[in-house]
Amino acid sequence: MARYIDVGLVDDHNEALNFYYKLIARKKIPFDGLCLVHFDSHPDLALPESIPVSKFTDRQELLENLTISDWILPAVYQQHFTSVVWIKPPWSSQIVAGEYEVELGVDDAGLLKTSSKLPYYLSDLSFNDDLKVKRKFKLHVIEVSHINEDISVQCKTLRNILQNQQWCLDFDMDFYSTQNPFMNLLGQNFGFIDSIFRYREMEDFSKSLQFRKTQLDCLKELCSSNDEKIELRLSEEQKEFFLSEVKHKFPKWKDSTEEAKLLAKDDKYITDLFYIGQQTELPHHLSTKTEIKTLLTNTESLLKSLQSSPVAITLARSEYDEYSTQETLDFVHCELVCLIKKFYSIQSDIECPKL
C-alpha cells in the first residue's frame, strides 16, 4: 500500500517551516538529515538578523521572527535539512547554477552568519570568517529553462543528489512567473534607487566588502534624513561614495529620494526606503502562458526522473506579498495540484482553485 504524503498549502513561504516542524513533532518525517528541493524564483537563503541562534530552539519565537527570505537556513543550522537544492528559472540570478559547500556559524553578537564568499551573502554583509559552532551544508543550484530544450542533464543531476536521500518537495508558485512589487512601488524612481543601492562586485574581495559596508552605511543615513547638511555627518569614505555615486550622477538626488520616500510610506508595505532600496535586484519576469506551461512540463520531467518520493510537500502561493503574478497564480496553483496528484498519493484535501 502506498504511503500517503502530507501536503501543506501556505501563502507566505516562511509558513512552510511551521508545517515541517509539525510533521517532525508528529514523527511523520525524520528529525534531521533531509534534503530540501526548493522550486522558487528566490533562494530564500538569507540569514535572519532579528533573532540570535540561542533562540532557535524556541520554535514559536523563531517562527515569529523569520521572513520569506530567511526561513530555510535556521532549519539547516538545526540540521533538519543537511542539503538544499534550489531549482531556479533563468531570470533568477542571485546565485549562479552549480554546487557549493556553505559554512554557517555564530558570530560574536550571537547571530547566524556564513563564511561563504558568494555575492548573495556579501551583498547583505552576512559574511564573517570568524565563526563559532560551525556547520556545513551542500547547496545545489539547478537552472531550468522556460523554453523547450533538453533538460536531461538537470534530471540526472537531481536524481544523483537525491540517491539514498530522504527529501522534502517545496514549491513557490512565483517560480513560474514572478514580479518585483517594489518596481511598481518606486515607479520612475526605480532606476535611480537601483543604481545607488546595487551591489558592486570587485576583483579584490576585501575592497568589495568594505565598499559595500560604506555604501549601505551612507545610504542608511541618506534614507533616514537627507537634508542639505548630510555631508557634514558622513565619514570620509561615505562622503566619497555620496559625492561620486549619488550627487554627481543624480544632481536631483534629494528630490528623487524624497519622492521615493513618500511612495514607500504611503504604500501598504509600511516599510522604509532603506529596506526597499535593497530589494531592487529581485527578479522580475511576467511569464507568458506558453512559458509557464513549458516550466510545468520541465517540472514534470524532473519529478518523473526521480527514483523516490518526497516525505512531505509544501506549496506557497506568495499572493499577498505580490511576488506571484495575479493573472496566472490560480492557473499555476491548479496545474501544480494536478501534477502532484499525478505522481504521489497525498494526505490532504488540497484542491484546485476555481478558475
Image (cartoon, rainbow, N blue to C red):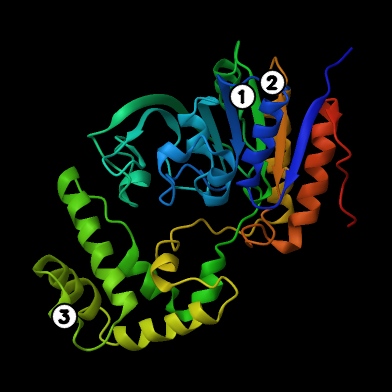
Residue plotted at (35% across, 89% down)? 255
Assess whether mark 2 and mark 1 are in contact (beta carbons under 8 angstroms): yes
Q: Which residue is mark 3?
A: 231
Residue plotted at (61% across, 58% down)? 323
Instruction: Inspect this view and state whether residue 140 appears.
Output: no
Q: Could you tell me the amino acid type at mark 2?
A: Ser
Marks 3 and 2, how far apart at CA: 59 Å
Mark seen at residue 155: 1
Judged from the image, the secondary structure of the residue bearing numbered disc 2 is loop
Horizontally, residue 242 falls left or right of residue 185, namely: left
Residue plotted at (62% across, 61% down)? 321
Q: Could you tell me the amino acid type at mark 3?
A: Glu
Question: How far across and how far down the image is residue 279, in percent?
Answer: 45, 61
Question: How far across and how far down the image is residue 46, in percent?
Answer: 44, 45
In this orientation, which residue lies closer to the viewer: 182 or 275? 275
Question: How far across and how far down the image is residue 105, in percent?
Answer: 34, 32
Q: Which residue is mark 2?
A: 305
Q: Quadrant of the C terminus?
A: bottom right
Marks 1 and 3, how far apart at CA: 55 Å
In this orientation, which residue lies closer to the viewer: 255 or 218? 218
In the rendered view, would you say 60 is above or below 281? above
Q: Could you tell me the amino acid type at mark 1?
A: Cys
Horizontally, residue 18 falls left or right of residue 343, namely: left
